[in-house]
Image (cartoon, helix red, strand yellow):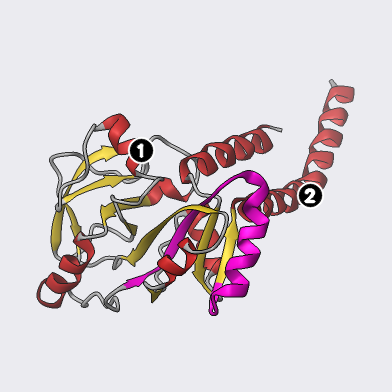
Amino acid sequence: GLITMGVNHALGVGMARLGADLMVVPRGAVDGTHTALVMGEPIAFYMDGSVVDRVRAIPGVEAASPQVFVETLASAACCTGRLLVVGFDPETDFTVRPWLYEALNRDLGPNEVVAGNHVLMTPSEPLRLYGSEYTVVGRLDPTGMGMDETVFIPLTSVPDMVERSRTLAEKPLEIPPGSVSTVMVRTAGPDKVEEVARAIEETIPGVSVLTAGQVTQGVTRNVSSLMAGLIPISVGVFLVSLILLLVL
């Protein structure tokens, strides 16, 4: 019961923090995106940036903002651990920026980042990403989801990181110019979500749409499987306890 309550609370907080009704990703990247959202597992995939304007043109789309995923190197001098770094567009973002203005009352500078609650960095300790150093100026509230393991950086800082990685990193960061990893979409209303998702997949070739409902269903399905596996253990513990009580 406690596990189920905890998962439901984490999903509620996480989906509210996500702030988007839909995520548009390259076809075949839905499973990886789901894992990144729930577990914070670093991923990297890209599609042409022209998708953003095409998504905005779909009827029922209220707002759309691009993000770029950067997967850092593990056990490398150029990087502080293996993290998922998300570049967001401050001009159009509606997921991270509201929190920034609530907590910092300003946008991020070119060498500043916001970290998830589980990224253990102090303000005085520089965050190293592909040889570039950044300052953690804020920490998101805990959500119990993958965002706790994520670092958010202004999208305009990503090309500079790519350029500097060619000389400063053990392995250069390769991101095609003008590419995006996902488009966060807010629809005109809850009743428009399925309609807009279907229109995006039918209109724009090579993309898939992930809804908040799919994320929730996936996690619930996994937890249900876990609970089913615990039933025999629970029955065994109950029987042993009953025998012990009878002996006593």
* Residue most extreme to the top: 248
For residue 206, say whether it is visible. yes
Instruction: State yes or no: residue 195 in magenta.
Output: yes
The reply, left or right, for residue 201 in relation to residue 134 is right
Image point (57%, 70%), residue name: 208
Image point (10%, 76%), residue name: 167
Q: Position of residue 6 (x, y in %)?
A: 60, 35
Residue 78 appears in which quarter of the rendering?
A: bottom left
Mark 2 highlights which residue?
228
Name the kind of residue labelled 2 in the image: Ala
Instruction: State yes or no: residue 191 in magenta.
Output: yes
Image point (15%, 53%), residue name: 110
The reply, left or right, for residue 148 in relation to residue 164 is right
Q: Position of residue 10 (x, y in %)?
A: 55, 39
Q: CA distance from mark 2 to mark 1?
A: 40 Å
Q: Nearer the viewer, residue 161 or 201?
A: 201
> Dot 2 lies on which element?
helix
Using the image, determine if residue 204 lies above or below residue 55: below
As drawn, the label of residue 24 is: none
Q: Position of residue 46 (x, y in %)?
A: 40, 74
Mark 1 highlights which residue?
98
Using the image, determine if residue 29 lies above or below residue 217: below
> Dot 1 lies on which element?
helix
- The segment highlighted magenta reads 179-207
